[in-house]
């Protein structure tokens, strides 16, 4: 399984090196979403009776994760478009690769790509929204578990939709409701990590860890039957 | 219902395959034995490709009896074994557009647990070892893609070759080369099923012709035994990947070897040949 996971991950990273879709298209897309949120919510806007933080700064954790989620959908779509393009999923079946290995390889690659994207988007969010940072450790833990949750659930649904002509529109419709709890937990944990107190965020980070384990486990078990049906 | 006979590679009795509820195969009876080259012919939509995919373990056996290479097609784990032991050259190439020819071959070799040492002889043999080696699949012509796809399949050394329109998109030399490969494979003990509209060429190659129409095998034709004996004699002493077993190279690769019937596709073993330049898609 590990051999197959590394093989798939290596192949996907080589494809990205050759095509630069994540770097050249998905990363700018995520940055554009962040900027547009910034334009839609004025940095000077404050709410009377609350703390002195601007509205934009207050909602910045949620906006960050929304941008990550939209970018993740693009990355997941791309990840399975290359498999569906010329019957490659059939090629993988013919090779007899371990479905759990394929799942881990593909989810792992998208996770790595999203982590790079999150570092760059996070830096952008600090610049655009002027958000401070209270707990780096909580932020790192939140980002790792939330990203793993997003990519593992997303990989499963992207595989489900990969054989369909309507996959571009169907996959977001399937994935977004499933990831709503992850978005909520990630936003609240990030809010605690950024604005403090960090103690409030650890319970959400723990929930994200449960989500991550659950989605990875389900993905490893369900990917084989899903591949057979696509 | 009778079971598979000795030497049976494909054994189908009343095989039904539903593709999105449509019976693409509606009760196929077919027996293919070791060493046969079976031509499947029939109109578009007759079920030839589905029959090949069923034999590859990719299309479902919804009803009936079916075994390939001794593995029961109704059992999921055995169907997976069928996939590993068969090679399918389909309309789709099973290649990644953004990887080069060599990267594709190396990936699929690792995926198929094939020794990396087989890659170079196959690249040589299919005239992909020169400049084409580092060209992305997206930059190849249809014929060159077909050759790359064939290279992946050949490197697997399958026991059962399932070729769906293997001559499509190839020039004359490429078509001759495919025919040579098929004969070589059979000489090594493989079995071949070909779906083709290039009836004259495929009929010459085949030891038996099967007509498929409306998801059923309608009739079977048998070539005269002397013809088959001649073909068997022509294909002796050749490995399935086209290399000469008498070669002194331990990998079976002789860089100068061009096979018994002349060089590889394009008329030159060197992929920098003028044919390949001309074969290259302008796009």
Image: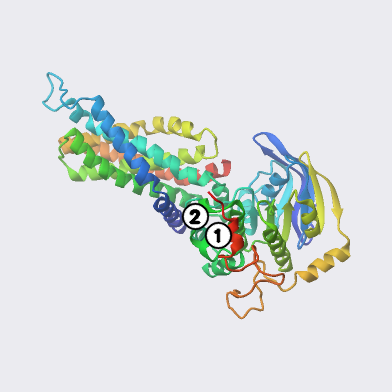
- Chain name for mark 1: B
- Chain name for mark 2: B
Residue B277's spot in the image, x, y percent? Answer: 57, 59
| Between B196 and A88, the one nearer to me in the picture | B196
The secondary element bearing badge 1 is classed as: loop
Q: Is residue A30 above or below residue B49?
A: above
Residue A213's spot in the image, x, y percent? Answer: 37, 44
Task: Say if residue A21 shows up in the picture.
Answer: yes
| Between B103 and B71, the one nearer to me in the picture | B103
Determine which residue is flagged by label 1: B112
Q: Earlier in the sequence, mark 2 or mark 1?
A: 1
Residue that lies at the very extreme toward the bottom in this rendered image: B248
Quadrant hosting residue A72:
top left
Which mark is drawn over residue B94? none
Residue A116's spot in the image, x, y percent? Answer: 30, 47
Residues at discs 2 and 1 in contact (Cβ within 8 Å) = no
Residue that lies at the very extreme toward the top in this rendered image: A48
Task: Please give left or right for residue A143 compared with residue A94 in the image.
Answer: left
Task: Say if residue A199 shows up in the picture.
Answer: no
User: How far is the residue under mark 2 from the one under mark 1?
Assistant: 21 Å
Residue B97's spot in the image, x, y percent? Answer: 50, 50
Which mark is drawn over residue B136? 2
Q: Quadrant of the C terminus of chain A?
A: top right
Q: Residues within 10 Å of mark 2 (few under 14, many from 20)?
A: some
């Amino acid at each position: 399984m590990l051999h197959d996971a590394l093989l798939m991950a290596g192949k996907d990273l080589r494809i990205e090196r050759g095509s630069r879709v994540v770097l050249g298209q998905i990363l700018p897309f995520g940055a554009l979403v962040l900027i547009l949120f910034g334009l839609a919510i004025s940095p000077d806007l404050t709410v009377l009776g609350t703390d002195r933080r601007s509205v934009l700064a207050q909602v910045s954790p949620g906006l960050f994760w929304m941008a990550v989620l939209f970018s993740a959908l693009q990355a997941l779509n791309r990840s399975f478009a290359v498999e569906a393009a010329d019957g490659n999923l059939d090629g993988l079946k013919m090779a007899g690769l371990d479905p759990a290995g394929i799942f881990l390889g593909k989810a792992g690659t998208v996770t790595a790509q999203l982590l790079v994207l999150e570092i760059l988007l996070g830096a952008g969010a600090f610049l655009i929204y002027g958000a401070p940072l209270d707990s780096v450790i909580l932020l790192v833990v939140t980002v790792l578990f939330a990203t793993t949750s997003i990519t593992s659930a997303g990989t499963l649904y992207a595989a489900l939709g990969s054989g369909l002509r309507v996959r571009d529109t169907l996959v977001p419709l399937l994935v977004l409701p499933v990831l709503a709890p992850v978005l909520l937990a990630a936003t609240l944990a990030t809010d605690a990590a950024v604005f403090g107190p960090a103690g409030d965020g650890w319970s959400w980070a723990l929930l994200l860890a449960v989500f991550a384990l659950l989605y990875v486990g389900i993905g490893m078990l369900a990917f084989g039957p899903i591949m057979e049906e696509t | 219902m009778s079971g598979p006979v000795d030497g049976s590679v494909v054994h189908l009795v009343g095989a039904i395959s539903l593709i999105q509820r449509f019976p693409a195969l509606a009760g196929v009876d077919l027996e293919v034995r070791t060493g046969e080259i079976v031509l499947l012919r029939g109109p578009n939509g007759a079920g030839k490709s589905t029959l090949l995919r069923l034999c590859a373990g990719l299309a479902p056996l919804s009803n009936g009896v079916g075994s390939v290479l001794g593995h029961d097609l109704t059992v999921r784990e055995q169907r997976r074994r069928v996939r590993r032991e068969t090679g399918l050259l389909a309309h789709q190439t099973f290649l990644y557009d953004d990887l080069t020819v060599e990267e594709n071959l190396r990936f699929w070799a690792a995926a198929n647990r094939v020794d990396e040492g087989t890659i170079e002889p196959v690249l040589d043999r299919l005239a992909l070892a020169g400049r084409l080696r580092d060209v992305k699949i997206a930059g190849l012509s249809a014929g060159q893609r077909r050759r790359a796809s064939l290279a992946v399949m050949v490197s697997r050394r399958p026991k059962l070759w399932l070729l769906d329109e293997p001559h499509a998109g190839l020039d004359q030399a490429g078509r001759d080369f495919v025919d040579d490969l098929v004969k070589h494979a059979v000489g090594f003990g493989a079995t071949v099923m070909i779906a083709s509209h290039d009836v004259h060429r495929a009929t010459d190659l085949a030891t038996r012709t099967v007509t498929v129409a409306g998801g059923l095998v309608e009739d079977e034709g048998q070539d005269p035994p002397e013809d088959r004996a001649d073909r068997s004699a022509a294909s002796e002493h050749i490995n399935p990947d086209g290399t000469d077993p008498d070669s002194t190279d331990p990998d079976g690769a002789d860089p100068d070897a061009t096979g018994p019937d002349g060089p590889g596709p394009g008329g030159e073993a060197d992929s920098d040949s003028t044919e390949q330049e001309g074969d290259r898609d302008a796009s």
